[in-house]
Amino acid sequence: MNDDSSIARLAAILRDETERARPGDRLPSSRELMRRHGVSPVTVSRAIAQLSAEGRVVTRPGSGAFVAPERGRAQAPDLSWQTVALDDRMVDDSAVSGLLARPADGVIPLTGGYLPPDLRPLSALSAAAARAVRRPESWSLPPLNGDPGLRRWFASEAGGTATPDDVLVVSGGQAGLTHALRALAAPGRPVLVETPTYPGALAAAKAAGLRATAVPVDQDGVRPDLLAEAFAVTGARVFLCQPTLHNPTGATLTLERREQVLAVARAAGAFVIEDDYARYLGADPIPPSLGSMDTNGTVVHIISLSKISAPSMRVAGVIARGPAAHRLRASQVVESFFVARPLQEAALEFVGSPAWRRHLAAVRQEILVRQGALLSGLARYVPQAEVELRPQGGFHVWVRLPQGTDEAAVVEAAQRKGVLVSPGRIYYPSEPPGPRIRLTHIASSSLAELDEGVRRLGTAFQDTR
Ligand SMILES: Cc1ncc(COP(=O)(O)O)c(C=O)c1O
């Protein structure tokens, strides 16, 4: 094993040992470290390189590694001047970083939103990437709005009247949200969001200086009547919506409501940002996207490839028209020019390969099985928990805990028992209506691990009663 975690673990042990040792003391030989810690030579040499970079050890070729003299050790620099230099414009990444955090060894993740390694189409992705990086032109400047073939593919996926010229390739759905929010609303303006909603969208809105106003969702998605009211009360010109397999509730907006939402937005002269992050995760056919039903540039439609492939497939298409599209393109060019061309070409190779359709079918099947296992585990181990909706796919289940439950205490107790769950409060822009947690079935490595995770959650829940 020489993965990042074993290197970090060995480095931590050696760091401790060097703290206790005297300058000049010799560290055990590489062979001895391999034997003691059951690690490979690469892990040993990387861990020692890390300590050497920190100034804690010095290596002498042929003699070994030694605890560095006192003056060579890294002194914590005095960075307090930065507190004075920086103003209070802090970007709050805590909820998103929490969702992206890697669980410690032995801890079962019922959080996160990406396929685990076993379900990623790794050989197809590697083959696609290998072909892409071999082409010399992959390293040249692409069209700034994205590879033409990839834009053609996103336009045909988007449906409706979308053309390749309407597509901007960006670095993942999160970047699409950020660019859309920045492009469509000036700092200080309101933006309407579903409540509850994806914390990454709330964080992006806040980072863009926007004030998020919540519009409730029910089992059929956002409530068009309340959306109309929210537009009227706030004067907002942007509504951020996940019509399909909404994160966290799993609700899918019905066709009738899709029509109503578009009509309400048009009447308010407002944009709808359609975060179509889960379009490939549906077990059943899903209604047409808002983007494909749009006739007058109301919808900015974001289609991401990361959820269905791998977290590092940081590629998404943003489909928009008119001056809004121009602003989106400008936002991306000013921020980062364009998405790395090898990645765009790898994405195009992958979605154009026969593996793509096979992979879609396999993931949809796996979602059905895992969702069933999560729901039956919940009924068995946490019968007090109420699942408001059985989603038609997706990775998540939104769970209502009995009124009076201390949500934070359940999350913490679960962590102590070795299972990660998402606290409901991070999904609300304002006061949560009661205790909730979001559970994810896709991140665990197997069905057995998923079941064990829910069992641990059950014991944690009992401990907090
Ligand atoms: C609802 C929703 N939208 C967008 C994203 C962004 O994903 P990505 O940037 O990987 O496309 C996520 C990721 O968790 C999500 O849950």
Image: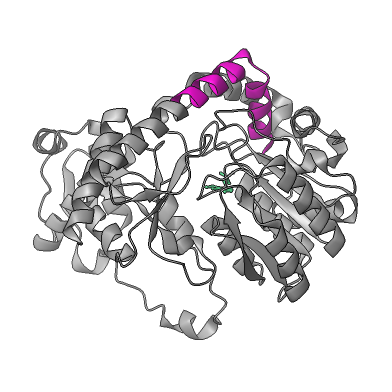
Residue at x 80%, y 29% (from the top left corner): 152
- Residue ranking furthest to the bottom: 84
- What x and y, as percent, mark residue 183? 77, 60
- What x and y, as percent, mark residue 431? 48, 72
Left or right placement of residue 369 versus residue 43 in this view = right
Quarter of the image holding residue 73? bottom left
Q: Is residue 155 visible?
A: yes
Look at the image and tell me in which quarter the N terminus lies.
Answer: top left
Q: How many marks?
A: 0
Left or right placement of residue 349 versus residue 235 in this view = left
- What x and y, as percent, mark residue 463? 17, 58
Up/down of 349 relative to 260, above or below: above
Looking at the rendering, the stretch of residues picked out in magenta corresponds to 338-366
Residue at x 60%, y 69% (from the top left corner): 206
**Magenta residue check for 408:** no
SS assignment for the magenta stretch, majority: helix
310 or 10, which lies in front?
Answer: 310
Q: Is residue 416 visible?
A: no
Up/down of 287 relative to 92, above or below: above
Up/down of 224 relative to 295, above or below: below
Residue at x 73%, y 56% (from the top left corner): 180
Left or right placement of residue 236 versus residue 30 in this view = right
- What x and y, as percent, mark residue 227? 71, 62
Look at the image and tell me in which quarter the C terminus lies.
Answer: bottom left
87 or 176, which lies in front?
Answer: 176
Residue at x 70%, y 25% (from the top left corner): 136
Image color mode: one colour
**Magenta residue check for 350:** yes
Left or right placement of residue 226 versus residue 16 in this view = right
